[in-house]
Each structure stands twice: as C-alpha cells, then as structure tokens.
Amino acid sequence: MAASGLGLATSFLPGHDTLLRRRRRRPASPAAASFRPVTAELGGVATELGRQLVEAVGVGLPCTVMQCGDVIYRSTLPRNDGLTITAPGVALALAAASYLWATPGVAPGFFDMFVLAFAERLFRPTFRKDDFVLGKKLGEGAFGVVYKASLANPEAAEKQGDVVVKKATEYGAVEIWMNERVRRACASSCADFLYGFRESKVKGKGAEEYWIIWRFEGEDTLYDLMQSKEFPYNVETKILGGVQNLPKGIGRENKIIQTVMRQLLFALDGLHSTGIVHRDIKPQNVIFSEGSRTFKIIDLGAAADLRVGINYIPKEFLLDPRYAAPEQYIMSTQTPSAPSVPVATTLSPVLWQLNLPDRFDIYSLGLIFLQMAFPSLRTDSSLIQFNRQLKRCNYDLEAWRNLVEPRATAELRRGFDIMDLDDGIGWELLTSMVRYKARQRISAEAALAHPYFNREGLLGLSVMQNVRLQLFRATQKDYSEAARWVVGLMARSGTEDVGGFTEAQLQELREIKPKKGSAQRNVLASLLRVQRKIVRTINESMDDLTSQRKSIWWSRWIPREE
Ligand SMILES: Nc1ncnc2c1ncn2[C@@H]1O[C@H](COP(=O)(O)OP(=O)(O)OP(=O)(O)O)[C@@H](O)[C@H]1O
Ligand SMILES: [Mg+2]
C-alpha cells in the first residue's frame, strides 16, 4: 500500500512490525504526477537522501520528497491509523502536564517570558524624569527615597491622579523586575505599578538611579493603622464598607481581623503561585488601597523570583529581624546569579518543593496576625521581647502560651480570647503559620481554605469542612522527618544485633569498597555512594551553570531614560 497522502506513513507507530520494500516502478498515478515538477525542483540529491532516510528509519515522507509508489508499506499486524492511547501514555502525559503547571509554573513561565512580557513592552506607557513633579517625602530606606508626586502635564495629572516615585539605587532593578512580573501575574496583590526606568547617567554625578512609579494607593499603611488605639475599628468602614451591626467586643474585632488576614493571604497567594517570595512582609509594607478597599503589598525590593531563578540578597541587605522567620534565608544559594532562564524555569517546581520558600512570608504574616489580635504586641519593643520569648520556647507557640498565660495582663488575655473564639480556630491557624520548620507551616492557599475563614459554618463543622481540615493538617506533615525515618530504618536494618549504625559507621560505609560475605551491608554502602554521587553531580552542574551567568542578566531588560 502506498504511503498516506498526508505524507506520513503509520510505520512509526509503536507496535508495528514494518517492512519497507522496494518495488518495481509502476506508472505514477495522476495525483503523484502533479507533484512531479515540485519534486524535480528539489533536485535529485534531496530525493535520494529522503529515500535513504525512509529506508533507514522506516518513516514515510511527503510525496514531494519521495516518489510515491516507490516505497510500499507492508505490515504483518493489523493497520492502526490513529494514535494509540495506552494507560502508561496517559499517565505520562498527565504527569508532564501537572509538572508544567506545578508552582511556580513552568508553562505559564514560558508564556509570560516570551509572549506577555513582549506584548506589555509594546503597549505600556513610558515616562521620563521631567514628567514628574516631586512632592512630600513618604519614606526613606537604606536604598532609596520615596516621594508622593504628580505628573507635570496638568491634563495627564488629572487623568492619572497622584503617583508615588521611588528613587532607588542599584537594587531598584530588582524592584522593577518584580513589579513588572506582578503586574502580569497578579496585579491586585501589590500596589498599582506604572513604570520603572534607569535614569540616564550624568557624567561625574555618582551612581545611577532607578525611578520606580506607582499609583498613589492611599495615606495609610497597616503599621499606621495598627498604631492607633482604635485598631481594628479604624479599618472597619474601610474594608467592610460600613459599621457592623454588632456591639463592640472581641467578636466584632475578630471579624475585622479575619477580613484583613483574608486579603493579605490572598495577596500573598498571588505572589507565591507565580514564584515570587516577598521576604520583607511587615505592617510597614502593607498599604491600604482606597480605590479597591483592600490591603495591598508594597516594597518588592527584597523579593525573590524563583520561577526564573532570581534569588537576590544584596550583601548589605538585612532582613527585618522583627518579622523574619528563624531560617533567615529561603534557598540554599544566596548569590544574585542564576542558571539560564529556561533551565531555572524548568527546574523551578523541583526547587520550590525542596525548599518551600513561600513559607518564609507565611511566618512573617503569622506575626502580623498575632500583632493584630494582641494589642500588647503591637509596639516594636514588645514584638522584640515576644521574639526573644518565642526563641527560648524553641519557636513553639503553645509553649509560649503556657509560659505567659498564667500571668497574662488584661490586654494579653484579650488576645487569647480573640484567638479562642469558635473553639480556638483562630489560634489553630496562627499556630500553623508561626512554626519553626518552614515545611510544617501552612501555605497561603491552604490557609485561605482554613475553617477560620468560614466561621458561619463552624457551629457544627460540616463533613466536607472536617475532611478539608483533616486533609490540610495531614498535608502539613514534615516530609524531612519521613526521609530521616527511612534512612534510619535502612541504617538499623544493617546490624540488628548492635541496634543500627552510628553516624561514624555510616560515613565509613560511604567510603569502603564492597566486601565479600555481607550482602546487606554492601547494598547499603552502594546506595549511599550513589546518593552522594547524585548530590555531588547536581551541585557541580548548578555551580557550573551559576558561574557562567555571573552577570545580572535580567537588569538588561530595564529601560533607560531616553
Ligand atoms: N503605592 C503607594 N501608595 C501610597 N503610598 C506608598 C506607595 N508605595 C509606597 N508608599 C509609601 O512610601 C513608604 C515607603 O515605601 P517602600 O516601603 O516601598 O520604600 P522603602 O524603601 O522600604 O522605604 P522605607 O524604608 O521608608 O519603608 C511606605 O511606607 C508608604 O507609606
Ligand atoms: Mg518598606
């Protein structure tokens, strides 16, 4: 039978025992004859090459390449023209698809990088320094000064409204990158970003500056609001659109705190699901947006984009110790370098699962939750004292509670009372956020599904809610414990009589050559050697890739002022 008119014979399909045989030349069919001139154009060499390829690999080519009728398809098995769907094939396809969409998202990452980023560049408005009239200073950090500003052109100023301009030093490049990423992936999580550029260098005028522009969201940060004695009532109308029909008391306060927490978790979930970890979550970096009536995150200068591998910690940059999680870092590498973008993006789900870097922000948000509920922990000094106490309790909130509750002041007691409402579901959420081990902390997504946010249905937890609660608790287990347990089991199985190997013996096992007569010991030694080799190879290849990319490649994308 002649190769299919579409040009592809089915001989490549798995399971086909194919035979390609040369046949005596037949007069060509009228259809084939109509292709002749094209074939002739391709030249004899290409045709011959095509034919040889066909014969070598058993794959049919279009009639434009091979002379149809020259090669025939014969199979001893029944022909199968369609795609063969097999169970392992489907499983493989599903696994590949779920990998591509797993956090932080390989497939969305490539789409963002190659399509959205370019499209955005074509259509975004651009600004230059002269377009702005700077107003009052809003803040001054170690790496930049922030001003309220307006556009110089009165028409544009009226249309645009007030803006915020941050004049940042070298680290401004990271902030521009992060803000552009956020605008494309989860715009509502952070303050409305307008544009960022590197100012044109004036000769002999010091370091370059980056200008970063946002819409002016509002006057108050969560920090400002929490400093008032009125908190949380001073945010009630802002976020709930009016005063609740409830008497003042812990129930009403809890409802407000719950709404703030939901908004912040939502914002964080947006950042985390696109692979960005903020690393400086604190009330000072949460702004109330008058326009959208929600709290938004600001100040992405210390953020890491783990989808493309920007894990940037400037050497002089100190994380805020009041809100930083005990681990102080989110990934093992702390250099501004990264492997090439496609490599980093492709590996990102693995690295994400290994490190769970998002849980760093969760710890900080847990502390904000604590401060909102406990008025006595809202000042800097009281938070520092709390951190010291918690450290002494090995970061176990339950132990801290046992320590302070017996001699609690009325203010502290009030905090526990709020957390204990609805059978302590708030306390449950808080303790699943503030934990020593990152892996044991709840994710933003799981926290949003926590029954704390479904209080109405809590009086009698529905079966589904109960299942969900149990499920999320079960999934928060520490997998590194499980891994240690397996290794321990392997080690113990070596010498039952002496109760397992010591660390020194295990080290020895890694070094020794296989011995005769002790099969179990040899298998274990080989396994440990293979494991060590794999780890070493991965480390070496990552180092290699990293050293090739020492330059901060992504800063090249930041536009310069014309
Ligand atoms: N989009 C915005 N709308 C309104 N106010 C803003 C906006 N962005 C920043 N601000 C104000 O500017 C202050 C400083 O901003 P940001 O946190 O980004 O800078 P920073 O470098 O950390 O400076 P600082 O160390 O003073 O916090 C914020 O605390 C907030 O009051
Ligand atoms: Mg800040």
Image: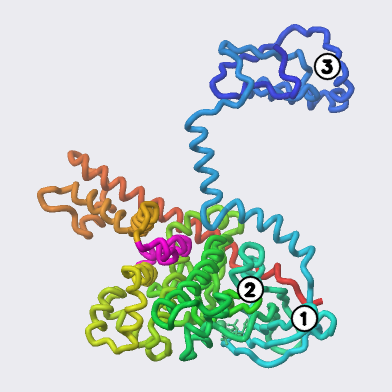
Considering the whole magenta stretch, tell me its main secondary structure: helix
Q: Position of residue 485 (x, y in %)?
A: 26, 54
Q: Is residue 235 visible?
A: yes
Residue 445 in the magenta stretch? The answer is yes
Which callout, 3 or 2, points to the residue nearer the camera? 2
**Circle 2 Cα neighbour tier, 10 Å, few/some/many (<14 / 14–19 / ≥20):** few
Q: Answer with left or right where residue 409 lies relative to residue 335.
A: left
Q: Amino acid at mark 2?
A: Ser
Q: Which residues are magenta?
A: 436-459
Q: Nearer the viewer, residue 412 or 402?
A: 412
Tag 1: residue type? Ser
Can residue 436 be spotted in the picture?
no
Camera-side residue: 424 or 385?
424
Q: Which residue is mark 2?
A: 292
Cβ atoms at labels 3 and 2 below 8 Å apart: no
Task: Tell which circle, 2 or 1, labels the residue nearer the N-terminal end.
Answer: 1
State which tag comes first along the sequence, 3 or 2. Answer: 3
In the picture, measured across the screen, residue 248 lies left or right of residue 219, that is left
Mark 2 or mark 1: which is in front? 2
Is residue 113 depicted above or below 217 in this figure? Answer: above
Q: Which residue is mark 1?
A: 200
> SS class of the residue under badge 3?
helix
The mark nearer the N terminus, 1 or 3, is: 3
Q: Quadrant of residue 210?
A: bottom right
Disc 3: which residue: 32
